[in-house]
Image (cartoon, rainbow, N blue to C red):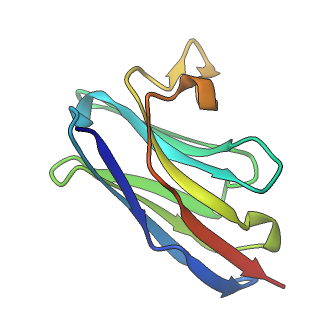
Amino acid sequence: QVHLVESGGGSVQAGGSLTLSCTTSGFTYSAYCMGWFRQTPGNEREGVASFDTYGAYRSSRYADSAKGRFTISRDSSRNTLTLQMHGLKPEDTGLYYCAARGRNCVSGGKWYWRPTDIDYWGQGTQVTVSS
């Protein structure tokens, strides 16, 4: 049975930092592109960051809103995923989901990181940034 469990959400003031973690089980972690989405009420989930691995190949990709402030990393020995978030802004508020895609996330220069590209989802962890 597949499990993706997020942790690390919380409430911070603007400019603060949070680190989200995702622990996984039930699938071949190393074969999946892993990453994060976020969602606010009334809006579709939007991709935040992804991390591809394939053999020695490593590639991370970020939404424009996350570049320079967020860092994604993964530990294949522990099947875990992390998102370090710095310089948080009120617009970063949302429910953050860990996600897994059973193919490369970047192919031919295109980023395949939309909700319809995802095979597995976590339940989400709330991040609230106050001004």
Q: Which of 31 and 68 is in front in this view?
A: 31
Task: Classify 87 as above or below 20.
Answer: below
Percent x, y of residue 84 = 50, 67
Residue at screen point 47% across, 67% down? 20
The structure residue drawn at horizontal position 59% and vertical position 61%, both measured from the top left corner, is 70
- Residue 125 image point, x, y percent: 53, 65
Q: In which quarter of the image is the C terminus?
A: bottom right
Quarter location, residue 32: top left
| Residue 81 visible (yes or no) | yes
Look at the picture and state if 70 lies above or below 50: below
Q: Which residue is depicted at the point 40% across and 20% down?
A: 103
**Image location of residue 4, percent across then percent down:** 35, 49
Name the residue nearer the viewer: 32 or 106: 32
**Residue farthest to the top?**
108
Location of residue 51 (image quadrant): top left
95 on left or right of 82? right
Please, is residue 75 above or below residue 21 in the view? above
Q: In screen coordinates, is 110 left or right of 58? A: right
**74 to the left or right of 51:** left
Camera-side residue of 57 and 75:
75
Can see residue 16?
A: no
Q: Check the image and name the residue furthest to the left.
A: 77
The number of numbered discs placed on residues in the rendered structure image is 0
> Looking at the picture, how far across and down is residue 86, in whole percent?
62, 73
What is the quadrant of the N terminus in the image?
A: top left
> Residue at the location (57% across, 12% down)?
108
